[in-house]
Image (cartoon, grey):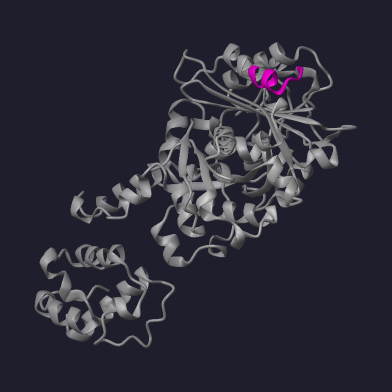
Amino acid sequence: MIRSAEDYQRIVITGVGLTAPNGDNLAEFRAALLEGKSGVNNYHIRYVGDTLAGECHFDELLYQKRKELRRGTRAGSVSIYCANQAVSDSGIEWSKIDPERVGVYIGVTEHGNVETENEINEIKAFDYDTKVWSHHHNPRTVANNPAGEVTLNMGITGPHYTIGAACAAGNAGLIQGAQMLQLGECDLAITGGVSESIRTFGIFAGFASQGALAEHEDPTRASRPFDLNRNGIVVAEGGSLFILERYSDAKRRGANIYGELVGHAMTSDASDFVLPNPEQQARCMKLALDRASINADQIDIVSTHATATTSGDIQECVALRNVFGDSTNTLINNTKSFIGHAMGAAGSLELAGNLPAFEDGLCHHTINVDDLDPECALPGLVLGEPRSKKEVTYILNNSFGMLGINSVVIIKKV
Amino acid sequence: MTAEEIREEVLDILENIAPDEDLTNMDDSVNFREQLELDSMDFLDIVMELRKRHRIQIPEDDYLNLASMDSTVTYLTPILKDVEKAK
């Protein structure tokens, strides 16, 4: 029961750094969500050809030299940008922080595909002579690369690693960071999720072979969770990293607190490689509610995972009905309709975009739902335009992934 | 390739490897690592790039010949004497 914890065991979010296809900081991202502005565009990638994607446009040279960019990975750059932005946003005086007491825990769906494909493409020009295979390949593809690049860039000497959790990774990173703070492994955690997935043709080709890659003549209308005319996933890149601190530390330094992590859960379906399992998704939500010691109808906003696949959308709605019944108090939205599926970054970006609701009382809407799938017609679904709420106290964020991995976090206004 | 062409080629490689460095005042007689921020991975990039551009395999024992611009050009001149400069 996290809610009954002492102040030093309570974990709060005190900084947000993000890059999304429609915004390079929380203010821009939130404004785009409230304005209904998509970040999906036409995109070309080798072998697959013309397709659609959510591409980020943050300034890579803000925190990295050109040489560091050349040596590192896109996921590393996304992580470095987000981590530096998050620290800056937190108001922490970085020079006074003990680098040994900072932990970096970053969720990823996958890592290494982009770099491996690049090398194979490179040696293709040399008749697959492996003597020209880069010595940079291993440091670029080790699973801890994105988190490790953050430590190198910021001089952090505490623990760092990534959390491989398919598309549940954004929440998983956040949960890992919170737990490490509670265990006393660090005093400040940089956590969340990142993705460079649009740089690998394999993700696009894999979804296409699965019949799950979105197509639309208007890119901004391609990602359509809950719409009858959806035709699959738009792949996106991005990242959102949070600064987590113990409530006692944040209070002592007078930090701006975005919210408190009062409940979280992770479960496994144990039923299929790709098909979701609504019973386990519902169990995951109930477990998080239980740990937060609240009832489902106390949740003000549910940020759904729905990716615009027929099965995924419908099964999540089955799980939501199971947990929330016909409650009209709980508003429900979806961020992927704006930016596509940011994979390892999805969970943390979708949570970040909803956090300002604690202040402005607005639940951003879901775009591109012209013809609502009756099986997704949940009473609290916010479509067309943002909806205001008298008070937003609890946000529940769903994030699910392949191999049946489910993650839920509940954030409370402080 | 002439010695001057080899120098231009190595300079071009260094510009890619160390894009933040100003190479205009580089002293050819001084070790690269004393005047540029190069580490062992960068050094391997020089070897790799020469391998890619000219299919030459530099033995590890010969790496010390690539310490400065002067020593690099001296070492590569006989190896690349029959090679045309890439356009």
From the viewer's perspective, is residue B57 above or below residue A290? below
**Which quadrant would the N terminus of chain A be assigned to in this image?**
top right
Residue occupying the point 10% across, 76% down: B82
Residue A407 image offset from top left, x and y in percent? 58, 26
Between B44 and A93, the one lying in front of the other is A93
x and y, in percent, of residue A324 in the image: 75, 15
Q: Is residue A149 left or right of residue A38?
A: left
The residue drawn where x is 63% and y is 40% is A349
* A395 and A13: which is toward the camera: A13
Asked if residue A218 shows in the view, the reply is: no
Which residue sits at x=72%, y=25%? Answer: A4
How far across and how far down the image is residue A313, in percent? 63, 21
Q: Position of residue A286 (x, y in %)?
A: 66, 16
Q: Give the main secondary structure of the magenta stretch.
A: helix
Residue A304: within the magenta?
no
- Does residue B41 appear in this view? yes
In the image, residue A130 above or below residue A219: below
Residue A288 falls within the magenta-colored stretch: yes
| Quadrant in which the C terminus of chain A appears | top right
Residues in magenta, as a range? A287-295
- Name the residue at the right extreme: A390
Along the viewing direction, whichever of A130 and A77 lies nearer the viewer: A77
